[in-house]
Image (cartoon, grey):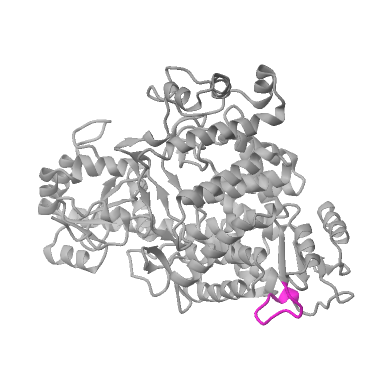
């Protein structure tokens, strides 16, 4: 027997279609049923890779007795938070307002009109963890609704007013942006940094890639302290545990303070952002370890999270065969049987500090215990041999691990998450001269602009050839930024033209007259509020991404109005960004671009000529985050960035122009001349 979730496009919803609960997807049918029958709504929000969502489903939603109570007293709605971030954001704000904390699964009770009046996260089937049993919660809410509905309606109105007020921000003054904001934010990141284990805060510990990116941007401008903090964090995380040393890629967070025991789910967006952070750290330091982590993460995505269409899947589950982390765990006996050679076993055991007792419920999570110099000294081998030898042993373990039952995969593709990953592949392609990564980025760009775009309008989600849901601000802004990056890697002006058209669409349909942008399109379904999320979380907010997109395009196109629009939205959050940098890290990157000396580079010439390619290699020889680059054949085709206009070839050869702060250098033909100008620019 199936419920109303059958036929959904979301793997998460499909996981629940055989529950005895009479689930509905969010939509008019469910909302109308609640209004007609005068029943409250039980809203459950989660996602496919969520371990505790699976637990609550098994304990409660598969229980016929609990399902009977839910069906009798409530209209039950199931939502995939990844497909509907608007609903997730609104009702998560309500949960946090009521309980002081949030998370998934989210369990929210609504009036028939959608106003929240009671909620929480995971509820157990029996009283435990200092929480009431879910059945008790259901019966209590049903009783109060029956006896005193007016009290509940009043409570729902009050909570709605609260989250509506918290959804508002005050517009700042144009031209008020200051580098002092960045200095103060960095000081707070420095003072709160965990020098023992790396990162910020206590367990559960999240990787904070946006904060690291902000510090790397500062490091690129000569800030040695920022580089020290960022690289320490990246090294600590890359030791293993949260980072999968065998197969590459990162889990969502660490359940302890020292990155050992992950929450084993792997999310596309984490790996996109972290791959880029490790790439930029490599470019700034030359440390080959950072490059290896970047490449192994991208290789993992190609191997395990890429659809034949070019789409990237959303996540890998934490569980396999009903156990969290089973796919990734080892025993010493297994390792000995796989590696066979005693010298290899001794080397590997020493590298990872392995014991018979394990380090996670009797099993082994691999995390480096001893560094390369220690191993070189102990085993009397060259330091340069350590990494290749470990990699060869990792490959042996990977081949065995791939024969295990794999974790479940959420195979839907989300526009913003795909765009973040496309950005990482396109940057790695040009900085590392990896044509295979360029191919991956181009295929994903073609997928997004073909299968998730219709007459300039974006969709949010795609699965098995079917797109669904209107796109959100974060989808538009992420894709615009990714297309700009893809254009810089593959100088086809079609990518740039699409970015321009999407920007016009974003401005026309998402702009808030009070400053900034709403998260939902103006024609979107009317909810209890029109959300406008400002804070960066695990993903950058749509508004911070939109600001960066507008800054980039204003520089490439010379459109002052777009620059003004970006500065206005940035000015709204400047005061809180400097006080709470971990919650506004992407905004800090936007402020850094806005207040720093900006550079523009134009390269013209036959794109297939070695001379043109050598100019491109010079441009991408260093990480210069506050630089925009445009390239095209000569003369530039229609739709090319305005930055390329009125720039003749020098000596009829491929030519580069370097400009900074509205002043341009003399054009040059050779990489050596170009590098001199770029180095002089970096030293200013």
Residue depicted at x 86% and y 59%: 677
Of residues 627 and 107, the one nearer the viewer is 627
Does any portion of residue 613 appear in the rendered image?
yes
In the image, residue 338 sits, relative to residue 99, either above or below, namely above
| Residue 526 sits in quarter | bottom left
Q: Nearer the viewer, residue 614 or 543?
A: 614
Find residue 50 and report its horizontal and vertical position in percent.
Answer: 35, 45
Q: Is residue 614 left or right of residue 369?
A: right
Between 604 and 217, the one lying in front of the other is 604
Question: On screen, 79 above or below 200?
Answer: below
Q: How many marks?
A: 0
The quadrant holding residue 113 is bottom left
Outermost residue on the front side: it is 341
Q: Which residues are magenta?
A: 632-644
- The residue at 59%/41% (across/down) is 293
In the displayed structure, does residue 51 sit left or right of residue 473?
A: left
Q: Quadrant of the N terminus?
A: bottom left
Residue 176 in the magenta stretch? The answer is: no
> Is 633 inside the magenta-drawn segment?
yes
Main SS of residues in magenta = loop
| Residue lying at 45% horizontally and 21% vertically, measured from the top left | 332
Q: Position of residue 124 (x, y in %)?
A: 23, 37
Q: Residue 312: horizontal and vertical position, in percent?
A: 46, 57
Q: Position of residue 631 (x, y in %)?
A: 72, 70
Q: Extreme bottom residue here?
A: 638
Indicate the quadrant where residue 43 lies: bottom left
């Amino acid at each position: 027997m199936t419920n109303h979730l059958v036929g959904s496009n979301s793997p998460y919803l499909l996981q629940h279609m055989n529950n005895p609960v009479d689930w509905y997807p969010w939509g008019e049918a469910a909302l109308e049923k609640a209004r007609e029958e005068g029943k409250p709504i039980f809203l459950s929000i989660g996602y496919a890779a969520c371990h505790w969502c699976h637990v609550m489903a098994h304990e409660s939603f598969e229980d016929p007795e609990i399902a009977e109570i839910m069906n009798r007293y409530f209209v039950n709605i199931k939502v995939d938070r990844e497909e509907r971030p608007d609903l997730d954001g609104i009702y998560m704000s309500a949960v946090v307002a009521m309980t002081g904390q949030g998370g998934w699964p989210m369990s929210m009770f609504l009036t028939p009109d959608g106003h929240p009046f009671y909620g929480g996260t995971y509820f157990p089937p029996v009283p435990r963890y200092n929480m009431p049993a879910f059945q008790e919660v259901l019966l209590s809410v049903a009783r109060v609704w029956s006896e005193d509905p007016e009290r509940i309606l009043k409570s729902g109105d009050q909570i709605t007013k609260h989250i509506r007020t918290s959804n508002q921000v005050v517009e700042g003054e144009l031209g008020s942006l200051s580098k002092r904001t960045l200095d103060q934010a960095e000081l707070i990141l420095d003072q709160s940094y965990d020098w023992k284990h790396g990162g910020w805060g206590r367990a559960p510990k999240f990787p904070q890639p946006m904060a690291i990116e902000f510090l790397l941007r500062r490091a690129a401008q000569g800030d040695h302290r920022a580089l020290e903090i960022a690289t320490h964090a990246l090294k600590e995380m890359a030791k293993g545990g949260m980072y999968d040393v065998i197969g590459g890629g990162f889990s969502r967070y660490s359940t302890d303070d020292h990155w050992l025991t992950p929450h084993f789910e792997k999310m596309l967006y984490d790996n996109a952002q972290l791959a880029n952070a490790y790439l930029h750290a490599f470019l700034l330091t030359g440390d080959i370890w950072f490059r290896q982590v970047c490449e192994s993460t991208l290789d993992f995505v190609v191997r395990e999270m890429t659809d034949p269409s070019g789409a990237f899947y959303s996540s890998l589950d934490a569980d396999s065969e009903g156990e969290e982390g089973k796919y990734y765990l080892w025993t010493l006996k297994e390792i000995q049987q796989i590696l066979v050679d005693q010298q290899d076993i001794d080397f590997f055991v020493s590298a990872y500090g392995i014991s018979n007792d394990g380090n996670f419920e009797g099993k082994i999570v691999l995390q480096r215990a001893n560094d390369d110099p220690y191993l070189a000294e102990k085993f009397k081998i060259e330091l340069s041999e350590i990494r290749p030898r470990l990699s060869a042993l990792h490959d042996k373990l990977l081949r065995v691990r791939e024969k295990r039952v794999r974790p479940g995969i959420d195979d839907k593709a989300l526009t913003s998450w795909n765009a973040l990953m496309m950005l990482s592949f396109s940057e790695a392609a040009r900085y590392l001269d990896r044509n295979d990564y360029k191919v991956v980025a181009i295929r994903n760009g073609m997928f997004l602009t073909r299968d998730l775009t219709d007459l300039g309008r974006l969709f949010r989600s795609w699965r098995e050839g079917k797109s669904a849901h209107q796109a959100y601000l974060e989808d538009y802004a992420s894709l615009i930024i990714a297309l700009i990056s893809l254009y810089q890697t593959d100088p086809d002006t079609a990518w740039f033209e699409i970015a321009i058209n999407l920007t016009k669409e974003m401005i026309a349909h998402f702009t808030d007259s009070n400053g900034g942008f709403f998260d939902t399109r103006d024609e979107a379904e009317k909810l209890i509020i029109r959300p406008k999320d400002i804070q960066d979380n695990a993903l950058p907010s749509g508004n911070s991404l939109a600001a960066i997109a507008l800054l980039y395009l204003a520089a490439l196109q010379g459109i002052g109005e777009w620059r003004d629009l970006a500065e206005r939205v940035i000015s709204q959050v400047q005061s809180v960004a400097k006080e709470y940098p971990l919650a506004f890290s992407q905004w800090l990157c936007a402020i850094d671009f806005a207040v720093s000396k900006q550079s523009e580079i134009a390269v013209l010439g036959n794109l297939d000529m070695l001379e043109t390619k050598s100019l491109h290699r010079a441009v991408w020889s260093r990480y210069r985050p506050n630089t925009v680059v445009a390239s095209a054949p000569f003369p530039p085709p229609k739709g090319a960035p305005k930055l390329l206009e009125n720039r003749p070839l020098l000596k009829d050869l491929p030519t580069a122009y370097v400009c900074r702060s509205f002043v341009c250098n003399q054009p040059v033909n050779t990489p050596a001349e170009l590098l001199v100008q770029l180095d002089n620019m970096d030293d200013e």
